[in-house]
Amino acid sequence: MQQFDLVVVGSGPAGRRGAIQAAKLGHKVLVIEQGKRVGGVSVHTGTIPSKTLRETALNLTGWRERGFYGRAYRVKQEISAEDLRRRLIITLDHEVEVLEHQFARNRVQLIRGKASFLTPETLQIVKDDGEIVQVSGKSIMLAVGTKPYRPASIPFDGKTILDSDELLEIEELPRSLAVIGAGVIGIEYATIFSALDAQVTVIDPKSTILDFIDREIVEDFTYQLRDRNMKLLLGTKADRIEKLDNGKCAITLDNGRTVVTDMVLYAAGRMGATDTLNLAAAGLEADDRGRLKVNLETFQTAVPHVFAAGDVVGFPSLASTSMEQGRVAARVAVGAIAKEPQKYFPYGIYAVPEISTCGLTEEEVKQRGIPYECGIARFRETSRGHIMGLDSGLLKMIFSLKTRRLLGVHIVGEGATELVHIGQAVLNLKGTVEYFVENTFNYPTLAEAYKIAGLDAWNRMGEIRPQETAEAPPAKSAVQRK
């Protein structure tokens, strides 16, 4: 039996980052991956495919240029599923090649097969060719990710009634699509297909969407969706889905309404992929959604030498946070010092338009009783926005009236997931509204919206007086120093 310092189950963002971190520290590391290729859900069915699909759709439809040339403008008149798949294959091949090179360069061993616990320290691996091997690890990291939730009541057929994994394999683009579930995955795919000019209907039993996002941003976002004729049927549940003789699907809602559509995407949640791990042999138990409970500082499970990281531990279920969780877990697992992560991380939703947020929402600020002021900038107020033909897009910042520090930044619109990092840096460095007022941004850029929003808040907050804060007296400008 081979013995390792760290055995990692899964090669997605958490698994690969953790494995490489431990290997760089000089430890013997094994990664077990049950898929045909490394990369996990992130590379093959989740993050990378959905974002590649989005980018391809925006490029081929000419979506970004329609502000100038009108809604009828298209780069390619007839867009097929094969057009979308071609770019996806190229992108995935590159991602896999890079990851395999990283494993080889850092001497991370890889076994393809299905892993399950025999004891808390030992794993059995059933390889693709049927061979069974056993390995042991001083520490074990579970980074198995998630899979779509597929209730028995939904008649999935892989062609017209699909989950989010199967959607990537469709042979023909639908003219109409119903999305059941208004979470991040459902909203991303709904807006992507809407950009491809499909008639999209979103159905969700909750009366609101994306509840962890600032409400003003969600209101702007939903206005844009309805403006392009997307139907949002919120506060209503899909009772039954059935296939019709003409090949279409009929969804019966609990209010008696029926939605007829070419294709149905069921995207109401995901399950931790822990059902085949034989967790009981390790002394572990998953919750009803297959997720594992961990110490969020060390990512240790109830069994101290067994760690879990990534989507399998639940919110926020982002590739970016999963990578950091895997790195921290690996450092703890091999006895290295793991610094506490930065307090604020960005959340990105790759819908059309993008949403990204970092820090406190206005609702959270109110709940905490913090006196505050907001600054707003619209992308059309920037010269770059005019150049790009943008007629939508919003950046919002929230500042403390007492300390003048930035509390949260929230963006909806083109490039939101890139722009948010400026606000993230200022948040983690405890910057104030004066940073945005006094800083120089490249011109013309969308980043200039930070200065506009900063001035919007500063105009209402007023000039800082020295006695107002002892934490960080404002730096003198070049003019003042003269």
Image (cartoon, rainbow, N blue to C red):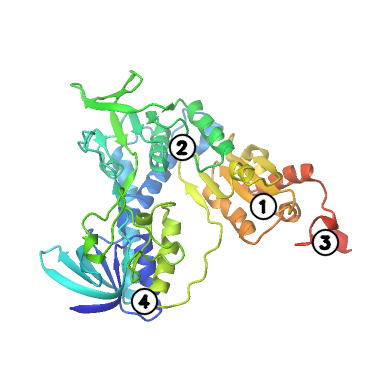
Q: Residues within 10 Å of mark 4 (few under 14, many from 20)?
A: many
Of the two numbered discs 1 and 3 on the same chain, state the one appearing first in sequence: 1
Say which element carries label 3: loop
Of the two numbered discs 2 and 1 on the same chain, state the one appearing first in sequence: 2
Q: Nearer the viewer, residue 350 or 232?
A: 232
Task: Tell me how far mark 1 sits from mark 3, CA to CA.
Answer: 19 Å
Task: Tell me how far mark 3 sits from mark 4, CA to CA.
Answer: 47 Å
Is residue 107 rendered to the left or right of residue 441?
Answer: left
Instruction: Identify the residue at horizontal 50%, vertical 50% (top origin).
Output: 347
Q: Going by the picture, which residue comes out furthest to the top?
A: 256
Task: Tell me how far mark 2 sits from mark 3, CA to CA.
Answer: 46 Å
Is residue 480 rendered to the left or right of residue 195?
Answer: right
Instruction: Identify the residue at horizontal 11%, vertical 68% (top origin).
Output: 131
Above or below, 239 relative to 460:
above
Q: Nearer the viewer, residue 195 or 279?
A: 279
Task: Tell me how far mark 2 sits from mark 1, CA to CA.
Answer: 36 Å
Pair 4/1: label in front = 1
Type of the residue with mark 4: Ala
Type of the residue with mark 3: Lys
Say which element carries label 1: strand
Q: Residues within 10 Å of mark 3 (few under 14, many from 20)?
A: few
Res. 406 mark: 1
Q: Nearer the viewer, residue 394 or 57?
A: 394
